[in-house]
Amino acid sequence: MLVLGAIDRHGGSATPSVLAADEGMRSSNLAAALRFLEARKLIVRSPDTKDRRKVRLRLSSAGQRFLDDSRARGERWLTEAMDACLTASERSDLIKAGTLLDRITAYSKAATPRSRRT
């Protein structure tokens, strides 16, 4: 799921080396994961149009459905767990925290001005 999600986030620009760096994976582990996903027809490899030595990765339609279904199951579980375990106030706090976490995960040293500090 980690690799499928990373390919999805990169769109048509995913390459094995970019994925390995972004996900902190050794190239041998990533290569094994890519072979597994390709054998199950969840990803498609194609040569880069500008540099034939590079390979671009994208999700196949089956891979996109698999990822979407998995995400939907996760969202349903999270909603059910939140409803079962949290009060309305706690759910509100968690949603607010999620917004803050989204900002943190989008952090880029070069792109974020220091004036955000309060």
Image (cartoon, rainbow, N blue to C red):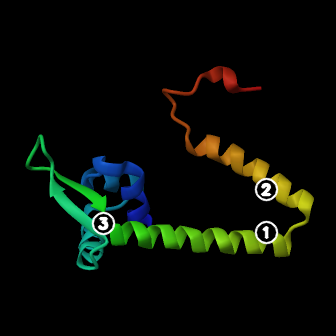
Within 10 angstroms of label 1, few (less than 14), some, or many (20 or more) residues?
Answer: some
Q: Residue furthest bottom?
A: 40
Residue 41's label in the rendered image is: none
Q: Name the residue rendered at 86%, 68% in the picture.
A: 86
Q: Residue furthest left?
A: 52
Image position of 21 with respect to 72: above or below: above
* Residue position for label 2: 94
27 displayed left or right of 66: left
Q: Name the residue rendered at 29%, 49% in the picture.
A: 12
Image position of 1 with respect to 118: above or below: below
Within 10 angstroms of label 3, few (less than 14), some, or many (20 or more) residues?
Answer: some
Image quarter (top left, top right, bottom left or bottom right) of the C terminus: top right
Image quarter (top left, top right, bottom left or bottom right) of the N terminus: bottom left
Residue 61: quadrant of the picture? bottom left
* Residue position for label 1: 82
Q: Name the residue rendered at 40%, 56% in the picture.
A: 8
* Amino acid type, label 1: Met
Q: List x then y, in percent, for residue 5.
A: 43, 61
41 displayed left or right of 116: left
Disc 3 from disc 2: Cα separation: 34 Å
Disc 1 from disc 2: Cα separation: 9 Å
* Residue position for label 3: 60
Q: Secondary structure at mark 3?
A: loop
* Amino acid type, label 2: Leu
- State which tag comes first along the sequence, 3 or 1: 3
Q: List x then y, in percent, for residue 20.
A: 32, 56
Question: Which of pointers 3 and 2 indicates the residue nearer the eye?
Answer: 3
40 displayed left or right of 45: right
Q: How many marks?
A: 3
Residues tagged 1 and 2 counted as in contact (Cβ below 8 A) = yes
